[in-house]
Image (spheres, rainbow, N blue to C red):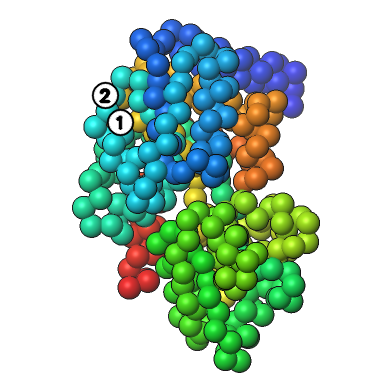
Amino acid sequence: MKFGALKTMVAAVAIAAAGATTAIAEWQPSGPIKLMIAFRAGGGVDTSARLLAEELSARHGWEIIPENVDGRGGAAMAAALKDEPADGQSIGMTAMDSLAYGVLATKNPGFGTDDFTYLSTVTGTQAGLIAKSSRGWKTLADVIAAAKAGEKITAGAMSAKLADALYLIGEANGIELTTVMVKGGQGGLNGVMADDLDIAWAAGPQTKGVQAGDLVNLVSAIGKPLNVSPDAPLLSEYGVEFVFGTMFGVIGPANMDAEAREAIQDAIAEVVNDPSSKLSNYISKAFGGPEAIKGADFDAFMQKASAEAEKLIEAAQ
């Protein structure tokens, strides 16, 4: 690359960064910002949201009050956030499948995907089907073989979408899995460790157990290798072409004030992309690492996710 071209590129990056900083500096909330969290305390969404709130407060002086509004797989928070003022004073963090899939799978959830302003994603999950290493299973193929040999396999799922994944695995491979609904990925992990479940979906909490050798990721559900288990096969190898990972994202009520939207989404992306931030470190260890999709790109992401959810629901009927 010629020196002049390099200088132009560096200048363009600097101008873009300056523009984002200016947007953040110009908009200031008139009071505390309520950060509604769609899932219970202690989970991945909750921890990510609280670390984000801490960072935004420290960097911009905004008073941010985290509040857990859990229930109905994220629908309780979405229904409550929809009716909040769209002035930037109320935002929420959720797993985006609770909107893209949840709106289609649930009759009258009390909201639609158009009821929200999409600010920025934070990270993607590391969804894998796990088992205790002591079972001797290395991949999903071993579980399928056990089921075909007559063993009853109980499988934990923390969402309707992941229950659909278990159904499709069974359908594609000529086996039957007994699905048990659990509370979050930690619920599935606990069930596997206690021998209450044979296998279960987990989306990040399994990382330490896999690294310690206590757990194994039997298959990746995210359409690409898992960070902690790069050799785990993909679901497509077992006849299931859908992807079952999700993104954690921050949203607001529909038609959010333009200045507030720009300032908040830029501030979130700044924290997510800063390798020195506590949030970036946490999501790099527990999930797929920093991934800030914001504004119009986030809108497009949600449109695609909704279209894919519609195809999945039809396939699982």
The numbered mark at residue 56 is: none
> Residue 180 at what x, y percent from top left?
46, 69
Q: Is residue 42 above or below residue 90?
A: below
Q: Is residue 59 above or below residue 142?
A: above
Residue matched to label 2: 85
Q: Is residue 206 above or below residue 1?
A: below
Image quadrant of residue 290?
A: top right
Mark 2–mark 1 distance (CA, rounded to whole Å) = 7 Å
As shown in the figure, which amino acid type bears the numbered disc 1? Pro
The answer to whether residue 12 is seen in the rendering is: no
Q: Is residue 175 above or below residue 217?
A: below
The answer to whether residue 200 is seen in the rendering is: yes
As shown in the figure, which amino acid type bears the numbered disc 2? Pro
> Residue 187 at what x, y percent from top left?
54, 57
Mark 2, other Cα within 10 Å: few <14 / some 14–19 / many ≥20? some
Image quadrant of residue 202?
A: bottom right
Quadrant that contains the C terminus: bottom left
Q: Nearer the viewer, residue 259 or 229?
A: 229
What residue is at 70 percent from the left and 25 percent from the top?
276
> Residue 21 at what x, y percent from top left?
53, 13
Circle 2 sits in a helix, a strand or a loop, which is it? loop
What residue is at 58 percent from the left and 87 percent from the top?
151
Mark 1, other Cα within 10 Å: few <14 / some 14–19 / many ≥20? many
What residue is at 73 percent from the left and 58 percent from the top?
210
Q: Nearer the viewer, residue 191 or 16?
A: 191
Circle 1 sits in a helix, a strand or a loop, which is it? strand
Furthest residue in direction top, as rendered: 26
Residue matched to label 1: 253
